Image (cartoon, rainbow, N blue to C red):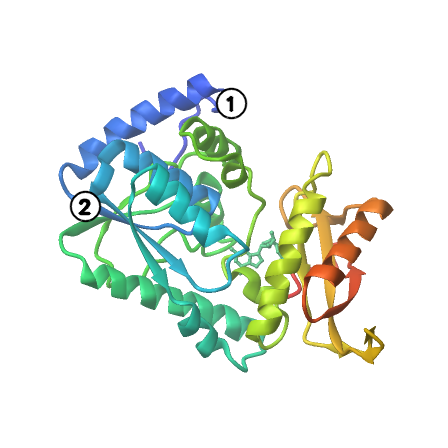
Amino acid sequence: MDPNVRPETMERITTPELAQAFIDEQVAAVKEQVGDKKVLLALSGGVDSSVVAALLIKAIGDQLVCVHVNHGLLRKGEPEQVIQVFKEELGANLIYVDAVDRFLDKLAGVDDPETKRKIIGGEFIDVFAEEAAKLEGIEFLGQGTIYPDILESKDGIKAHHNVGGMPEEFDFELVEPVKLLYKDEVRVVGKQLGLPDNMVYRQPFPGPGLGVRCVGAITRDRLEAVREADAIVREEIGKMSPAPWQYFVAIPDVKSTGIKDGKRYMGWAAVIRAIHTVDAVTAKSVEIPWDMLCIIRDRIIAEVPGINRVLWDFSDKPVATIEWE
Ligand code: XMP
């Protein structure tokens, strides 16, 4: 039986009971696979790596070493939440790496989107490899691979970062306890493991993070503006029921004229985007109620330094992609 093929008899995990049965089964399997050895896991705070971390902590406790790399491109409050949930509440063996300066220095002046992505991805691997080299006795690498990653890699749709994406110098055996699960099942398992709702039901977030929403060459001040405006938009649009599939803010590298306290105020425009999609291949703009738009506009203008305009990008995909870069 191919371990990368989901058996047809495998029941879809939709209830706490089914999630618990899956957890019990995987805890036993991981114990069996790992024995008394150590597992290393890159913990981004996204749904998949968080669920794998919680599962592995249950199975092997402090034989799991989690590394959280803060590259400065995470959303507001995310690094803090990873530390709070995993280190404080679950007692994880967590190494927090503050690599903010390192990433932002490398990205300074780079405005080409693909070059930005390559720098972020490459630097991430470097930081992670450096941390791994400092540790002794690691034999396994935990990964948050899920079933769509395997299917898409097989079909040649995309070379997913979770499937064979780690460099060859990582001579580790993989531990991938959720690799046969679909995203909705990963969320049910995460909830059963006691992870907070805002972690388990988190909207999709690109690997290069806010880097692709700080459009053009990233500067620290505009990146902070993206982070603050994004937090406001997530809070306000998150009140819609149902919430859109993905909603965020992008800030292009353009300043326009404004007026503040009787003086000329050159500022950036914060662009709001809210879309609905099934597979992210096509997407429809979601209608945001006018009253909500006004609240968002007023809050961003009042609370985010450097912004003097708020725009709504209501383009569909195609022709616009979901992200601006
Ligand atoms: P686009 O902009 O291509 O986005 O319409 C489709 C979906 O993919 C996410 N996205 C990324 N995810 N690494 C990721 O892990 C990336 O470089 C990346 N670029 C876009 C995007 O947020 C949307 O959900």
Q: Secondary structure at mark 1?
A: loop
Compare marks 1 and 2 and give the one earlier in the sequence.
1
Q: Which mark is residue 260?
A: none
The x and y percentages for residue 200 are 50, 37
Residue placed under numbered mark 1 in the picture:
14
Q: Disc 1 to disc 2, how far (Cα)?
A: 31 Å
Residue 231 visible (yes or no): yes
Q: Ligand 1 sits in which quadrant? A: bottom right
Name the residue rendered at 54%, 71% in the picture.
114
The x and y percentages for residue 268 are 72, 72
- The amino acid at mark 2 is Lys
- The amino acid at mark 1 is Thr
In the depicted structure, whether residue 163 falls above or below residue 101: above
The x and y percentages for residue 162 are 40, 51
272 sits left or right of 121 in the view = right
Front one among 218 and 158: 218
Q: Classify mark 1: residues with Cα within 10 Å, few (<14), some (14-19) or many (20+).
A: some
Name the residue rendered at 26%, 66% in the picture.
130
198 sits left or right of 312 in the view = left
Q: Secondary structure at mark 2?
A: strand
Query: Residue 279: which quarter of the image?
Result: top right
In which quadrant will I find the C terminus?
bottom right
The yes-or-no answer for disc 2 within 8 Å of ligand 1 is no
Residue placed under numbered mark 2 in the picture:
38
Name the residue rendered at 58%, 66% in the picture.
224
Total numbered circles:
2
168 sits left or right of 181 in the view = left
Residue 10 visible (yes or no): no
